Amino acid sequence: MSNPSLLILAGDGIGPEVMAEVRKIIDWFSKNRGLAFDVSEDLVGGAAYDAHGTPLTDETMQRAQESDAILLGAVGGPKYDVLDFNLKPERGLLRLRKEMDLYANLRPAQCFDALAEFSSLKTEVVGGLDIMIVRELTSGVYFGEPRGIHKEGNERVGINTQRYTESEIARVARSAFELARKRDNRVCSMEKANVMESGVLWRDVVTEVHAAEYSDVELSHMYADAGAMQLTRWPKQFDVIVTDNLFGDLLSDLAAMLTGSLGMLPSASLGAPMANGRPKALYEPVHGSAPDIAGQGKANPIACILSFAMALRYSFDQGAEADRLETAVNAVLADGLRTADLMGPNDGTPVATAAMGDAIAAKLDASL
Ligand code: IPM
Ligand code: MG
């Protein structure tokens, strides 16, 4: 049998330099744990636009569809701000999500013990925090029609449409309930049923799926604005949060920053199982392309490395090896190694991107 295929789309900004560290880790697992992958690379975002005049070519889209998993770095940069909306780097990422139907976006917000002091909240509020946001990723206002900007009389009108079908809500609700069963068995669903019909439907469908299939899981509901407030007040009250595309975008940034370590957090975007039983899957850090520090060896590769750990867990059924990698990351942090994003101005010398990757590989060596 051939090796599972891994398509690397490093993208823009710090994407390529953090991905170089992930390659070290992938090589480590193939050399030391017998986990061989067929790794190939391709372009996405501004990099693809520069080479081909589009943020994602049809050929790359096709390769993505045929890959067992995709690892993506980051897309975007100021250089591309002037581009037509449909040529912007972000459209490449959105096309991948939509055409692969990656409807369940898993965004863990975990507080690393060694970094609790970096949170803007008190250590007692965030210490030991471990929540999972499940964001619906392929529908809602991001994709709903009609959309666009048109003229009405003398002025322009901008339109986007929030639209959800029952089946779109039900399948992401199932993802959340399944995850909760492997965690603390609690799901909180967030919408704005007080204002939006799509929120009323969301609440109804989540409640129905729960009653019919998951009554062993504890379910609660919150309006998304109250949810944001509760996330900053006492985040540890949550286990799994399930919410729509736009609220999930906002709430996951908020949750990530609670941990004090936006540069540390991975994500998985999962779709339906393929013929080989693996889910369609794309893994990427929650952080962006950070063009201001690109190419200077300042970027933190940990979020991207932990995204590969998620790939080991969710695509390749290698939970124990994912644990090994996460333990190695924790060990490096416990030793006091910090990239620049994790340091104050008077905290000494940061380690460079490549040195962080090497240190994690060394901890992996020590784990054998
Ligand atoms: C994210 C990002 C994207 C989004 C952008 C880059 C299109 O903010 O993954 O959260 O809005 O979904
Ligand atoms: Mg976002």
Image (cartoon, helix red, strand yellow):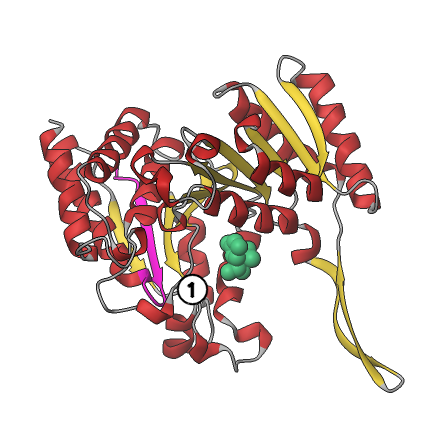
Rendered image quadrant of residue 11:
bottom left
Residue sitting at x 52%, y 50%? 253
Tell me which segment is drawn in magenta.
Answer: 1-15
Q: Residue furthest front?
A: 346
Q: Quadrant of the C terminus?
A: top left
Asked if residue 199 can be seen in this view, the reply is: yes
Say which residue label 1 marks. Answer: 75
Q: Nearer the viewer, residue 194 or 282?
A: 194
Q: Is residue 10 magenta?
A: yes
Q: Is residue 297 magenta?
A: no
Q: Nearer the viewer, residue 265 or 82?
A: 265
Residue sitting at x 57%, y 40%? 232
Indicate left or right for 256 with 156 as reference.
Answer: left
Q: Is mark 1 within 8 Å of ligand 1?
A: yes
In percent of width and height, residue 64 lies at 42, 53
Where is 352 relative to 54, above or below?
above
Indicate left or right for 155 with 254 as reference.
Answer: right
Q: Residue furthest right?
A: 153
